[in-house]
Image (spheres, rainbow, N blue to C red):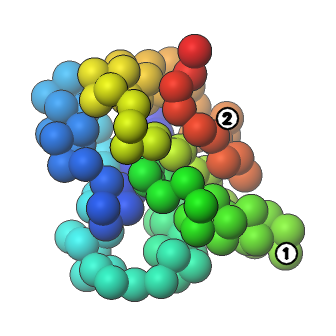
Amino acid sequence: MIRFAADEDFDNDIIRALKRRISDTDIVRVQDADLSGTADAVVLAWAAGEGRVLLTHDASTMSFHALERLRVDESMPGVIVAHQRLPIGDVIEDLVLIATCSTPEEWAGRVYFLPLR
């Protein structure tokens, strides 16, 4: 099963809904890991060390830092970007699909922008 990390500003309603839909979802919020206010590069390094795919709304700087990690051959379990303008229900459905129908290896080294369709 995919292990997720949620960026500091990731919508908590999405996190709660994902946990309701899939009770054994393994998701850690950055603030619960005592990383509030930490630079994106540090958050990505922590997620990589923990083997967690990072969920974020930050399409510009987080994706930049993720691609930079790949450029210098640093590991990255993956980043999934959900723009804040997307309907919350669509984001939840996509994340449920990702969590239940894919493997961690499919997301490694990827920066993916929702929606899936």
Q: Is residue 24 visible?
A: no
Quadrant where the C terminus is found in the figure? top right
Q: Residue at x 47, y 83 (%)?
A: 39
Q: Is residue 64 visible?
A: yes
Q: Position of residue 10 (x, y in %)?
A: 31, 54
Q: Residue at x 37, y 43 (%)?
A: 84
Q: Quadrant of residue 100?
A: top left
Q: Nearer the viewer, mark 2 or mark 1?
A: 1
Q: Position of residue 73 (x, y in %)?
A: 84, 70
Foreground residue among 84 and 16: 84
Q: Quadrant of residue 23?
A: top left
Gap in Å between the C-alphas at discs 2 and 1?
Answer: 20 Å
Q: Which mark is residue 6?
A: none
Question: Could you say whether the residue bearing mark 2 is in a helix, strand or loop?
Answer: helix
At label 1, the amino acid type is Val
Q: Residue at x 66, y 71 (%)?
A: 65
Quadrant where the N terminus is found in the figure? top left
Q: Which residue is mark 1?
A: 72
Side of 86 where 53 appears, left or right: right
Q: Position of residue 111 (x, y in %)?
A: 66, 48
Foreground residue among 27 and 63: 63
Question: Could you say whether the residue bearing mark 1 is in a helix, strand or loop?
Answer: loop
Q: Which residue is mark 2?
A: 106
Foreground residue among 57 and 95: 57
